[in-house]
Amino acid sequence: MKPRPFLIGLSLTAGVAMLGAVAIQRLQVLDLRAEQQQKLAHATAPAEALPPPQVASSSSVSREVLQLRNQVGQLRRRRDELLPVRAEHDRLVLELAGRTTNASGLPRNFIRKSEARLVGYSSPEATLQSFLYAIRNRDLTNFFQAFTPEGVSQLKSQGLESPDRLQKLFDESQDLIGLSILDQKRQQDLISANVQILPGVPPTPILFRLVNSQWKMDGLP
């Protein structure tokens, strides 16, 4: 995946945010200056009128304040318009990575989420495929079926028992292309495996336990 498009999108968003911050800061300075001038005028001028120079200065500052407020409003609207563009950009970068990464760049046992099926839990690879199937289809039942009872308890302790949190997890997992097991070591009813998302991404160690003749995960990949 080439980083240049990602950096361009990031720079565009950061530039708009920086311009907005500068404009807001200048607006605050001008507001403070106008307030100070108004206090000074009230303290030194007769009650019936303000000196013409002070009135002219205050009007000038007020016009500049209004212009800056208009600019800040435009920048904020532009920032809000760019937020979905940035999200779509990141999604397309990940999708492009999945399409351009050919078979020679992916492990032979790489499991694509788009092709995952519900195949049970007879092996760690089968468990990962059923897990990806559950994520793609937002299948809560089969999502929890991929974990040991201890793993389910851990997920619930992290707040994933809430339907809202689970739906958020599913939303965040939409850009997940797939998973693969780099290596695994078995000790009786326990398999320690290194699970990778994409080549070049550091793998995550996952424990698979044999529960009623089925291999279940102790935690999220």
Image (tube, grey):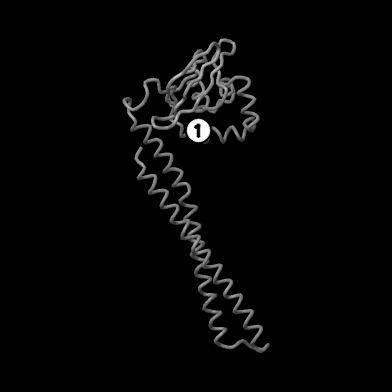
Residue 68 rendering spot, x and y as whole percentages: 50, 68
Label 1, secondary structure: give it.
loop
Residue 124 rendering spot, x and y as whole percentages: 49, 17
Decide: is 2 above or below 48.
above
Taking depth in this image into account, of 55 and 155 the one nearest to the observer is 155
Mark 1 Cα shell of 10 Å, populated few (<14), some (14-19), many (≥20): some
Taking depth in this image into account, of 15 and 88 the one nearest to the observer is 15
Image quarter of residue 105: top left
- How many numbered discs sit on the rendered protein? 1
Q: Quadrant of the N terminus?
A: top left
Q: Is residue 207 left or right of residue 86?
A: right
Residue 30 rendering spot, x and y as whole percentages: 54, 72
Decide: is 12 above or below 210.
below
Q: Is residue 28 left or right of residue 100?
A: right
Give the residue at mark 1.
Answer: 173
Residue 209 rendering spot, x and y as whole percentages: 56, 16
Q: Residue at x 50, y 33 (%)?
A: 173
